[in-house]
């Protein structure tokens, strides 16, 4: 039998489209948040700080302290988001495996009770367990990475080790 049996041809342009769509969606969300936070940092918070200063003694002024604290939090969040944007722009989705679980993969797992669970491996910022989107950095996400259909997945949790069988795998490259 040919080693290429069952392999679907995917063109470089198809991979580039998927690469662009995934990165574009995440980058847009981050840049929108950065813009909103920068507006708050440069326009809204200075007004709040000025208003609080007008109330007098800054040592015992709760409004002033709260506004300054918020300013630090917003500044830190902007720095973190800019760092993530830079990391994502450098991310090469072509290096994600075509035949094993990786970022963007959708996996069908069967637990020891026979229940089938469906998860998509996403970035930590997109994780939402209720929607079936788990981070590649989470314990179950790390356990699933680089697994193939038919593999056993062992997840170490505080309650003990849980075992799953990886029934089906769709990678980011399988998208149209």
Image (cartoon, helix red, strand yellow):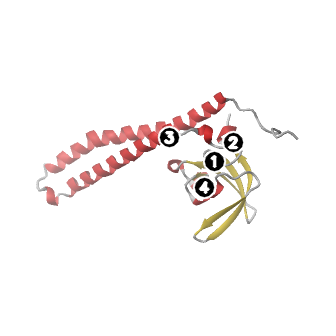
The first of marks 4 and 3 along the sequence is: 3
The first of marks 1 and 4 along the sequence is: 1
Callout 4: SS = helix
Q: 162 or 143, which is in the foreground?
A: 143
Within 10 angstroms of label 3, few (less than 14), some, or many (20 or more) residues?
some
Q: Is residue 44 left or right of residue 173?
A: left
The first of marks 2 and 3 along the sequence is: 3
Report which residue position mark 1 lands on. Answer: 102
The first of marks 4 and 2 along the sequence is: 2
Residue 12 location, x and y as percent? 66, 29
Report which residue position mark 4 lands on. Answer: 141
Callout 2: SS = loop
Within 10 angstroms of label 1, few (less than 14), some, or many (20 or more) residues?
many
Please tell me which residue is depicted at 36% across the width and 40% down the height of the picture: 36
Q: Give the foreground label among 4 and 2.
A: 2
Q: Report, in whole angstroms, how far the alpha carbon at label 1 lies from the one at label 4.
A: 9 Å
The image quarter in which residue 66 lies = bottom left
Callout 1: SS = loop
Q: 161 or 41, which is in the foreground?
A: 161
Q: Residue 98: which disc?
A: 2
Q: Report, in whole angstroms, how far the alpha carbon at label 2 lies from the one at label 3.
A: 20 Å
Please tell me which residue is depicted at 67% across the width and 38% down the height of the picture: 173
Q: Report, in whole angstroms, how far the alpha carbon at label 4 lies from the one at label 3.
A: 19 Å
Please tell me which residue is depicted at 53% across the width and 40% down the height of the picture: 91
Please tell me which residue is depicted at 35% across the width and 42% down the height of the picture: 37
Looking at the image, residue 56 lies above or below residue 89 = below
Report which residue position mark 3 lands on. Answer: 88
């Amino acid at each position: 039998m040919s080693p290429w049996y069952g392999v679907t041809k995917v063109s470089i342009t198809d991979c580039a489209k998927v690469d662009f769509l995934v990165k574009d969606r995440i980058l847009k969300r981050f840049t929108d948040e950065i813009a909103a936070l920068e507006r708050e940092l440069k326009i809204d918070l200075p007004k709040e700080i000025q208003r609080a200063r007008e109330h007098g003694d800054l040592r015992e002024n709760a409004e002033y302290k709260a506004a300054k604290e918020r300013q630090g939090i917003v500044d830190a969040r902007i720095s973190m988001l800019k760092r993530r944007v830079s990391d994502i722009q450098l991310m090469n989705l072509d290096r994600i495996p075509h035949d094993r679980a990786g970022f963007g993969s959708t996996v069908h797992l069967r637990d020891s009770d026979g229940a089938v669970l469906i998860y998509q491996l996403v970035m930590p910022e997109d994780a939402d367990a209720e929607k079936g989107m788990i981070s590649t950095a989470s314990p179950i996400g790390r356990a699933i990475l680089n697994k193939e259909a038919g593999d056993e997945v062992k997840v170490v949790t505080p309650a003990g080790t849980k075992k799953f069988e990886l029934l089906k795998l769709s990678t980011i490259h399988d998208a149209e």
